[in-house]
């Protein structure tokens, strides 16, 4: 039960709207990290929460008179954990007891029945059939080695190459359970990273051979004279660190930062330093720990600083060429990771929240465009809302170009060659044209993409009068084509992934032949002979005559044989009695202070007197303690019979 309590303490803050994510809670550094099995229970509980809510609502309506099943628990989070363990956990049972376990077990049978009625559990988890994505960290491992190792570990039929992101392996959904135990993941050679979050670095640095950031090859020149040797640094002076060429403005936890560093420091490319900034000290610690594992060669430098306070004229940024900007967002596109738990019914201030987020995102994007030496900017969010995506891009282009056009430059949207194979594009909203929307990339899990919701915009600074819109120059589409087929990598023949390749085929529903309905012969209706009209007229006449006789007898005071007329007479008599009682009551009230008469004795009312009633004690026991004073009847024969019964019972 201690495991469940730890899991409920971790889950409880996540059930409150506006709370931080699960990873931020679990690995904030303020306390010891939760055990792996506790973290796994919380992840699975959050993933299946929509199904659990539906089951709870159904059982409450059918078996608890509409009262919530978990209403009696002090901690609803514990109830959700116990529900998951009982209905969907590996063993499908609760270990231990307590009030929470008793409350859930009380409805165990209807809960299990409701889960069965909802169909396969996988249908309620949108990511159940998604593949797992593993990015090969080319700073430490080659794609060929990682692909060959994965094929040996999981089987070549469960490993594929992504057609757009060159350094991304796509694994069968069954491989997800053991990915964390893979040695290459533990050592940093491979990174478990969602497909959507890989697109930003690919767009900025051009992961398909487009190295705009690399200096042009130098042409050999004749030596005209000996160059002067550069003066040696003063003894004891610290070595000057190289100026960064790329900046990740909101870098923590560091997956996009290390991905960008791997692309711009590919074999054969000149060394490029990537600077990662984050204003939260706890997140910077995570960033440094992560980059130490993924980029041990010093390709990434983590700095605790606020990006919005960075001065474009600072000497540190003199060699800056590109900025990767992935600011805080609503996270409306995240469905595969339990980092955020939101309830649509509790999001009352959604419009106001989106307004605050979009204003911050616009401010951050305009700041990136204010660096005069920066040539390219990649902006991304994990949101599917237009307010955070196309609307921000449209406003940024309008405001930024209004400031720099006087200098003979402007910013334009560009469709990067490295993402030319991506099908889903942006929307022509927020002041954007259809051509500009075609330069944007979107991922939408609600529209069939097997990845989280994401948005990427790629900007290029151009000279006024020039044009950079449309496709960027360079090699495009990914080196493995548009999906399908196979490629030989590291001695293994690896498939190129196609969307839905491993999704299980839907089982055809059994169509049962309709059973012929039994056609029962219609029973003949009873046809009663119609009474002739003459007979009906005679019946009416007889009834009228009876009524006349009743009225005559009533006047003479005779017997009333007609039942309906008797009821009417009784009702009239009762009303007359009520009126008389009301008049008597009014007369007593007007008398003013007159004493109420004592009730008449029973004998006068027509009943029996006390002397005529048998004494209960004498009748049951044959004796009475108030023999001389008792007002009731003491018959000797009755007393003798009572005493005889008692003696017989005692014997």
Image (cartoon, rainbow, N blue to C red):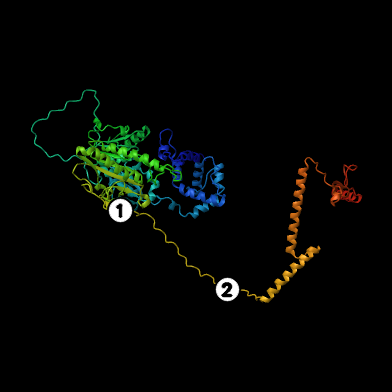
Q: Which of 603 and 527 is in front in this view?
A: 603
Q: Are marks 1 and 2 in contact (CB under 8 Å)?
A: no
Upstream in sequence: badge 1 or badge 2: 1
Q: Quadrant of residue 44?
A: top left
Using a 10 Å C-alpha cutoff, classify the residue at mark 2 as few (fewer than 14 neighbours), some (14 to 19) or many (20 or more).
few
Q: Mark 1 points at which residue?
A: 495
Using a 10 Å C-alpha cutoff, classify the residue at mark 1 as few (fewer than 14 neighbours), some (14 to 19) or many (20 or more).
many
Q: Which of 417 and 398 is in front in this view?
A: 398
- Is residue 568 something one can see in this rendering? yes
Percent position of residue 425, x then y: 30, 50
Q: Which of 131 and 325 is in front in this view?
A: 325
Disc on res. 522? 2
Q: Is mark 2 on a helix, strand or loop?
A: loop
- Is residue 134 something one can see in this rendering? no
Residue at 75 percent across and 49 percent down: it is: 582
Q: What element carries label 1?
A: strand
Q: Nearer the viewer, residue 104 or 150?
A: 104
Residue at 36 percent across and 52 percent down: it is: 447
Q: Mark 1 or mark 2, which is nearer to you?
A: 2
Specify the farthest residue to the top.
Answer: 235
Percent position of residue 254, x then y: 33, 38
Cα distance between the residues tagged 1 and 2: 68 Å
Percent position of residue 82, x then y: 51, 44
**In the shown orientation, is residue 184 left or right of residue 540?**
left
Specify the farthest residue to the right.
Answer: 636
**In the shown orientation, is residue 382 left or right of residue 487?**
right
Disc on res. 601? none
Percent position of residue 246, x then y: 26, 37
């Amino acid at each position: 039960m201690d495991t469940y309590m730890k899991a409920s303490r971790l889950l409880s803050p996540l059930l409150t709207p506006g709370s931080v994510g699960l990873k931020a809670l679990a690995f904030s550094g303020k306390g010891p990290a939760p055990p792996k099995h506790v973290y796994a229970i919380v992840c699975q509980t959050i993933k299946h929460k929509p199904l659990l809510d539906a089951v709870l609502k159904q059982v409450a309506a059918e078996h608890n008179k509409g009262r919530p099943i978990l209403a009696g628990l002090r901690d609803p989070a514990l109830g959700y954990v116990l529900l998951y363990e009982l209905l969907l956990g590996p063993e499908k049972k609760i270990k231990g007891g307590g009030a929470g376990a008793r409350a859930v077990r009380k409805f165990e049978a209807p809960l299990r029945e409701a889960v069965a009625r909802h169909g396969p559990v996988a249908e309620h988890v949108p990511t159940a059939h998604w593949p797992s994505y593993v990015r090969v960290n080319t700073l430490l491992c080659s794609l060929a080695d990682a692909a060959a190792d994965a094929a040996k570990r999981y089987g070549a039929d469960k490993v594929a190459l992504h057609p757009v992101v060159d350094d991304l392996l796509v694994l069968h959904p069954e491989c997800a359970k053991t990915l964390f135990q893979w040695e290459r993941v533990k050592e940093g050679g491979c990174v478990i990273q969602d497909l959507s979050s890989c697109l930003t670095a690919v767009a900025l640095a051009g992961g398909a051979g487009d190295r705009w950031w690399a200096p042009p090859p130098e042409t050999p020149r004749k030596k005209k004279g000996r160059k002067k040797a550069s003066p040696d640094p003063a003894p004891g002076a610290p070595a000057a660190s190289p100026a960064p060429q790329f900046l990740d403005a909101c870098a923590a936890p560091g997956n996009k930062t290390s991905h960008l560093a791997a692309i711009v420091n590919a074999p054969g490319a000149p060394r490029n330093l990537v600077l990662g900034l984050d204003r939260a000290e706890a997140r910077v610690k995570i960033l440094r720990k992560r980059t130490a594992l993924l980029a041990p060669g010093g390709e990434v430098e983590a700095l605790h600083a606020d990006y919005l306070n960075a001065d474009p004229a600072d000497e540190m940024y003199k060699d800056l060429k590109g900025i990767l900007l992935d600011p805080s967002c609503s996270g409306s596109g995240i469905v595969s990771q339990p980092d955020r738990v939101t309830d649509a019914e509790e999001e009352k201030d959604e419009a106001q929240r989106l307004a605050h987020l979009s204003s911050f995102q616009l401010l951050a994007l305009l700041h990136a465009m204010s660096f005069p030496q920066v040539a390219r900017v990649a902006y991304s969010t994990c949101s599917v809302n237009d307010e955070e995506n196309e609307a921000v891009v449209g406003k940024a282009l309008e405001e930024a170009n209004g400031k720099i056009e006087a200098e003979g430059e402007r910013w334009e949207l560009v469709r990067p060659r490295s993402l030319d194979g991506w099908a889903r594009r942006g929307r022509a909203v927020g002041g954007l044209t259809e051509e500009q929307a075609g330069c944007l990339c979107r991922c939408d899990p609600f529209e069939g993409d097997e990845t989280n919701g994401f948005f990427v915009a790629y900007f290029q600074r151009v000279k006024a009068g020039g044009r950079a819109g449309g496709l960027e120059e360079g090699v495009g589409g990914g080196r493995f084509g548009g999906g399908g087929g196979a490629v030989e990598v590291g001695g293994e023949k690896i498939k190129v992934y196609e969307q839905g390749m491993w999704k299980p085929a839907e089982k055809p529903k059994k169509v049962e032949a309709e059973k012929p309905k039994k056609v029962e012969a219609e029973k003949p209706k009873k046809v009663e002979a119609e009474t002739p009209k003459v007979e009906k007229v005679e019946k009416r006449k007889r009834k009228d005559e009876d009524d006349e006789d009743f009225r005559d007898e009533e006047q003479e005071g005779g017997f009333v044989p007609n039942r309906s007329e008797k009821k009417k007479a009784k009702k009239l008599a009762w009303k007359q009695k009520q009126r008389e009682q009301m008049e008597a009551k009014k007369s007593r009230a007007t008398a003013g202070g007159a004493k109420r008469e004592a009730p008449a004795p029973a004998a006068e009312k027509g009943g029996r007197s006390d002397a005529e009633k048998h004494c209960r004690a004498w009748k049951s026991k044959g004796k009475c303690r108030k023999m001389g004073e008792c007002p009731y009847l003491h018959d000797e024969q009755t007393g003798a019979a009572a005493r005889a019964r008692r003696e017989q019972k005692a014997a």
